[in-house]
């Protein structure tokens, strides 16, 4: 018996020495890995380092307890194959969990930094936690199976719980997946001016649940991502910041339409020369469009180099139209109705 304890102690001591040597080697390898360009070797060493040391010690203890007959019969359950299998399942889960966590954190963060949206930045922590819980849940089921415990109720319970959670959080999940679609499809980016449904303004953030728009009235509108993906989105910043500005005009019947067109084109050229926001490519154009009830109606079309100046263009051009039409004695009509009364039979 004494020899058994001596051999067991020697085995454990040898295991501790081997564990110490493994620890030193791992530290040396980590220093070498720090000098390389890739981070994958760092992630692998970080995952297997401590679990490897623990595995060597656990294996030496297992050998000491099973080979030298030092464990009382009442404690024999400690050295069954099921226990050692459970230990190594836990060690495997530990390695896999650390590896997946650091892999997602390192490479996921790199990918997220290259994108303009902050949606993927917020998804990374969720993926890290989800990977860890999933790995440990699988390890738990494997241990139960190793001990001959029926895992069917656990799987059924997990399925029911997942279904209940999905039904309870269907709006959240819908917005979450819609956010992922926005991140992939990229119909807009932060800073773009958009119109989504009836909301018009600049995109200030794109989150996993919602997109925030700052309106031109300085109000913050939070639009659920599911509504974004199901609505028509107008992006004024794509393909560039240029915007067509339509200036409607009306002149009285009898006006010289050719002269009206000359004046409007002259105003457009003047706007391009005297302002920084009207451009001549594409060239301005004037269209006589319809005979109205009380006027001849048309449109002056010109372009601004930035959608922010659409109202400035309209203000400048309308002011010049009012002045030039007055100087040229071109009448701008107002809506009027002629009422004629007839006299029947001396009434």
Image (tube, grey):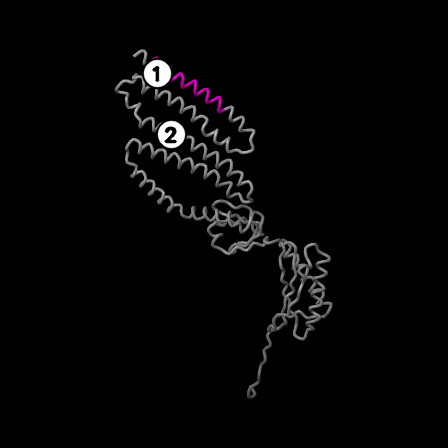
- Percent position (x, y) of residue 115? 55, 43
Q: Which residue is mark 1?
A: 8
Q: Secondary structure at mark 1?
A: helix
| Chain part drawn in magenta | 6-26
Nearer-the-camera pick, 221 or 55:
55
Looking at the image, residue 260 lies above or below residue 34: below
Q: Quadrant of residue 157?
A: top left
The answer to whether residue 11 is left or right of residue 265 is: left
Q: Quadrant of residue 74?
A: top left
Q: Is residue 219 magenta?
A: no
| Residue drawn at x 31%, y 17% as measured from the top left | 68
Q: Is residue 10 magenta?
A: yes
Looking at the image, residue 330 lies above or below residue 172: below
Looking at the image, residue 162 lies above or below residue 291: above
Q: Which residue is mark 2?
A: 90
Q: Give the main secondary structure of the magenta stretch.
A: helix
The answer to whether residue 179 is left or right of residue 91 is: right
- Percent position (x, y) of residue 217? 58, 52
| Residue drawn at x 68%, y 55% as measured from the top left | 277
- Extreme residue toward the top, this view: 2
């Amino acid at each position: 018996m004494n020899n058994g304890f001596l051999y067991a102690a020697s085995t454990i001591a040898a295991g501790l020495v081997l564990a110490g040597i493994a620890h030193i080697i791992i530290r040396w390898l980590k220093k070498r890995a720090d000098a390389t360009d890739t981070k994958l070797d760092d992630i692998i060493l970080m995952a297997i380092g401590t679990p490897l040391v623990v595995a060597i010690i656990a294996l030496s203890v297992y050998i000491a307890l099973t080979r030298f007959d030092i464990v009382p019969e009442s404690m024999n359950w400690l050295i069954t194959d099921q226990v050692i299998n459970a230990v190594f399942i836990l060690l495997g889960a530990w390695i896999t969990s650390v590896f997946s966590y650091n892999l997602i954190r390192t490479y996921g963060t790199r990918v997220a930094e290259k994108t303009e949206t902050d949606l993927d930045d917020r998804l990374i922590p969720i993926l890290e936690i989800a990977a860890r819980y999933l790995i440990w849940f699988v390890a738990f089921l494997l241990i139960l199976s190793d001990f001959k415990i029926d895992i069917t109720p656990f799987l059924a319970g997990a399925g029911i719980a997942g279904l209940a959670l999905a039904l309870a959080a269907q709006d959240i999940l819908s917005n979450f997946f819609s956010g992922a679609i926005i991140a992939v499809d990229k119909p807009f980016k932060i800073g773009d001016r958009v119109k989504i449904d009836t909301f018009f303004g600049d995109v200030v953030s794109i989150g996993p649940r919602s997109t925030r728009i700052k309106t031109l009235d300085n109000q913050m509108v939070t639009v659920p991502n599911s509504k974004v993906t199901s609505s028509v989105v107008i992006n004024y910043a794509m393909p560039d910041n240029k915007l067509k500005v339509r200036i409607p005009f009306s002149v009285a019947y009898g006006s010289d339409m050719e002269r009206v067109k000359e004046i409007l084109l002259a105003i457009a050229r003047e706007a391009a020369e005297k302002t920084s926001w009207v451009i001549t490519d594409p060239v301005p154009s004037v269209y006589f469009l319809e005979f109205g009830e009380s006027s001849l109606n048309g449109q002056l079309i010109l372009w601004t180099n930035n959608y922010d100046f659409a109202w400035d263009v309209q203000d400048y051009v309308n002011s010049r139209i009012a002045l030039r039409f007055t100087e040229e004695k071109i009448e701008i009509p107002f809506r009027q109705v002629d009422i004629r009364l007839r006299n029947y039979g001396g009434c």
